[in-house]
Image (cartoon, rainbow, N blue to C red):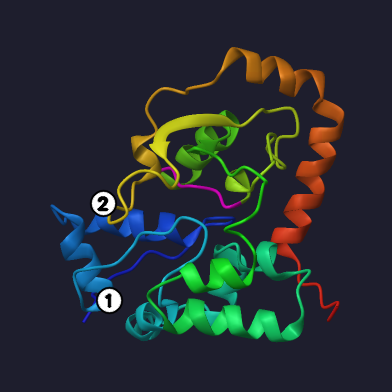
Amino acid sequence: MLGYFPTPYEDEIFYSVIARYHVHSGNLNFVDTIRDLYGKTQLKATPDLATNLSAVYENLKVFNYLPLEELLKKHTMYLYYTNFTKSKVKDQSKQIILYESNLSKVYRILGILGNKIKEPNFFRFCNKCLEEDFKNYGENYWHLTHQLPSVFYCHKHPDEILLDSEIWYRRGSRTEFKSASLIGNAVQNTNELELIEKNKSILKRITKESVKLATQSYDWNL
């Protein structure tokens, strides 16, 4: 039985919560961390959604943890991906995230596999958030809204361009949960920065609307 598990910070993606647990636990490898949480040693670390979330939650209820529904909607990209889908698709996606270990089915149902919108190559961060988080919590974490596709500005600090860390977002190890404490040096393409500055007005608007989509529930039942 787990003796401890961190509570998510504001706007923290669940991947990051597991990464912080790994650091806090003192586990030397991720196999031990996955065993602690899931009771098995093989699991894919997915940055945007959560794998078999209900299995982890069973171990967290002893801590009077936040509700499972809140964990799903506030700390994964479930809302961002499903807000403009039918109720049936929402329900199917939810069941897969909660109870299955292979998320390829949910990506297929939601059309993410064929989506032409480019997701970030690396985990991204805002310099001001980084400073504030460390000052307030003594550690850093990955913000959910900083990882949204086509978002280039921080919604909390609207003039701050998001920077790439050295941590792969999806192309890195599929069995490791990398903590934001490993950010390293910011990596940013000069040409990309110039393009962002040139289109800052529209990109800031996209950021604002994307954050709404990721944090509020819409029921259109199209």
Q: Is residue 90 above or below residue 148?
A: below
Question: What is the spatial separation of the Cα atoms under label 2 and label 1, in whole angstroms?
Answer: 17 Å
Horizontally, residue 134 falls left or right of residue 222, namely left
Residue 90 lies, in percent from the top left, at 67, 79
Instruction: Answer above or below: position of 95 versus 150.
Output: below
Residue at the image position 44 percent from the left and 65 percent from the top: 7
Q: Is residue 126 left or right of residue 178?
A: right
Label 1 amino acid?
Tyr
Mark 1: secondary structure: helix
The disc at residue 38 is 1
Percent of width and height locating residue 81: 66, 64
Q: Main secondary structure of the magenta part?
A: loop
Instruction: Say which of 200 and 64 sits in front.
Output: 200
Q: Amino acid at mark 2?
A: Val
The 10 Å Cα crowd at callout 2, few under 14, some 14 to 19, many 20 or more, is some
For the point 48% across and 47% down, the residue is 142
Residue 33 picture quarter: bottom left
Total label count?
A: 2
Location of the N terminus by quadrant is bottom left
Instruction: Tell whether position 211 is magenta.
Output: no
Residue 79, can we see it? yes
Which of the 4 quarters of the picture holds residue 86? Answer: bottom right
Residue 141 highlighted magenta (yes or no)? yes
Left or right: residue 26 compared with residue 104: left
Q: Which residues are magenta?
A: 139-144
Circle 2 SS class: helix
The residue that label 2 is drawn on is 23
